[in-house]
Image (spheres, rainbow, N blue to C red):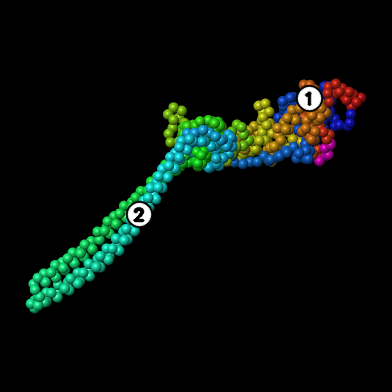
Amino acid sequence: MGSRPSIPNRWAGSLLGLMVLVLPIAAIAHVGHDHGADFQSGTSQPVSGIRVEAATAQRLGIQLESVQRRSLSTGLQTTGEVVTQPDQTVMVNAPINGTVVELLVQPGDRVQKGQALARVIAPDLIELRVSSQGDRVGAEAELRAAQANLTLAQRNYERQEAIAATEIAAAQQQVALAQDRYQQDQRLAGAGAIARQQLLESESNLAAARSQLTRAESRQPVLEAQAELERSQAALAAAQSHLQLSTATYQTRLQQLNSPATEQGVVTVVAPIAGQVAERPVTLGEAVEEAVTPMMSIVNGDRLRVTANVYEKDLGQVAEGQAVRATVASLPDQIFEGRVVTVGAVVDGTTRVIPVTAELDDAGLLKPGMFAELEILSDRTPEAVLTIPTRALVDAEGRTLVFVQNGEAFEPVEVTVGRRAGEQVEIQSGLFEGDQVVVQGALQLYAQSLRGDGEPAAAEETDPVVRSGLSVPGWGWGLGGGAIAAAAFYLGRRSRPTAAALHSPIPDPSPELVLTATRPEAAATEADHRHP
């Protein structure tokens, strides 16, 4: 075997009785820091650091963050349900009695407002349109007759106006002549030049002329022609109204449908809102009933809400506009932020809870009906505490681990966590401010740290992570070897080096293994070579 550092003499008697452990130490992590107890070797507990070269860490996507002190926003925890906004879920029912002849979208499709969803052929609409067309033909004929009568009445009125004007002028002239003749006869009769009978005739002619003028000025024929003109105008207006009404029933029906229709009676059902098609219960060729048969449901999930209940005793911590955070089981690493929009007005008399609704800012990945853990932010930690991202935590059969960088190695460290606030969690023990912890790739490191099959070569052949340059020790050859390995690791991990040791060169470890151990049957052979 190659040259390796020997175990100190004070441990030789107890350790060499079982086996010889050769332990090249790649790095000493955080001089002066004691992160807590290490873990026993075995199939479920990590026992040492994992050495990863920089290039390999980059290929594996390992990311680090520093342990920092910060104030955490904490709040009231409750469970709620993801729901849509009141006007953002629509069930599209059949707009008319008919038969489905075309389905244009599938469940899950996203649609825009006004987009065509399906087409229905409606015999009633065809019948209504034909009846409307018949009424329109009759109304158009009536309208044409009214227009002709109006034209005649207009011409007759104009003619009577001209006749009346002529008659009035002639009557006025006759009156003027009769007046002059009567005045002249009056003078002659006074002088005794004419007989009394002639004066009476002149007076009678003047009265007749005046009577004719009065009849002419009455314009009776004109008034009659004007009345006929007005009757013709009224008839025309009625015909026009009838024409409009002949199509109004059909057009009104189309407006009630709120959907375009063809002359063949095919009605296009359109989306009333933008969103996603959740259900499509109808099938092609199915007969549908107006306002009764559901055809599709559309849900707009761009802006969702979470409804939850808060106990009466916690009501003082909740107010409209308050910030919230929500998580769902299917997306445990994603936090959805929002704000409280409504707080109920009445406390339930039995459960003593009050409903609270929060609107989420970006809920594109959520679905209505999901259960959500809702945190209503109401307080901040009074002082800064040690925090790390929650994604750095690894659940190791009841123990919470993080991997801390030590040079090119990453060591598992058990931590005690406290309060959580969104993506950050308080660390009560196990870490120090400034420690570099793995926030991406920790599960890969943990999986490799659990390998204990004692066959590193085989692992390198089958494990893509190991083949890429990441390797761990094999500790699975027995409880004795495991206990000694753990003890040796504890000495190397927890011993505080002297100043001379800190400045002395560290032996270059194998490029594949950080920790190596010999099996019990090989220990005696090596001991014989080292202690002849």
Taking the magenta stretch, the answer to whether it contains residue 196 is no
Q: Give the left or right position of residue 434, taking residue 204 as reference.
A: right
- Residue 325's label in the rendered image is none
**Residue positioned 90% across, 26% down in the render:** 529
Q: Nearer the viewer, residue 132 or 109?
A: 132
**Position of 482 relative to 313 (above/below):** above
Under circle 1, the secondary element is loop
Residue at the disc numbered 1: 453
The amino acid type found where label 1 is placed reads Asp
Span colored in magenta: 503-508
Which quadrant, please, contains the C terminus? top right
Which quadrant, please, contains the N terminus? top right
Q: Main secondary structure of the magenta part?
A: loop
Residue at the disc numbered 2: 150
Residue 442 x, y percent position in the rendering: 70, 34
Q: Give the left or right position of residue 118, taking residue 20 as reference.
A: left
Q: How many marks?
A: 2
Residue 29 x, y percent position in the rendering: 75, 36
